[in-house]
Image (cartoon, rainbow, N blue to C red):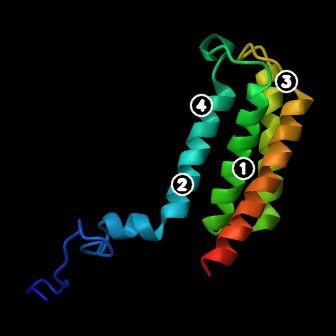
Amino acid sequence: MLGNGYPVSDSDTPGHAGRPGQHGVGWVAAHRWKVAFGVAVLVSLVVLFTPESGVPPAIPGTDKLVHLALFGALAGTGRLSGAGRRWLVPALLAYAVSSEVIQASDLLGRSASVADVIADTLGVVFGLLFALRWRRRHA
């Protein structure tokens, strides 16, 4: 310990976050699923709410895979970050439906699709199964 009352540590060393209030590598490692969930939320906002003019052309059906993967990532990382199923699942399903309603509005110039909501729902199921398997494997 130094004279300042804090243990000697290097915030660049894994497992050491430095002084209280500092966020080093150790903090990120300890909160990796929360960070991953935050990234998934940000990516979903960009993907789901980009106006039609900003959406690149793609092979038909690709958007369903994107929806499946996106909501799988949201559910999996959300669950592994500590979110309870009782609020996470309804919140993600509400997000799926509301994103389609917003896409159908004149605001984005995109169209709504029931198939997208189905893909989102399947993504939530797959994400929860992934999280369950991950926890069992790393318990």
Q: Residue at x 69, y 17 (%)?
A: 58
Q: 134 or 3, which lies in front? A: 134
Cα distance in 3D space between marks 1 and 3? 20 Å
Give the answer, above or below, for where 39 lies relative to 4: above
Callout 1, which amino acid?
A: Gly
| Residue at the disc numbered 4 | 46
- The quadrant in which the C terminus is found is bottom right
Residue 119, given in percent of the width and then of the height, sits at 83, 39
Residue position for label 1 = 72
Residue 27: image x %, image y %? Answer: 38, 68
Q: Which mark is residue 112?
A: 3
* Image mark count: 4
Dot 4 surroundings within 10 Å: few (below 14), some, or many (20 or more)? few
**Mark whose residue sits in front, 2 or 3:** 2
Image quadrant where residue 75 sits: bottom right
Name the one closer to the observer, 136 or 54: 136
Cβ atoms under marks 2 and 3 closer than 8 Å: no
Residue 23 can be seen, yes or no: no
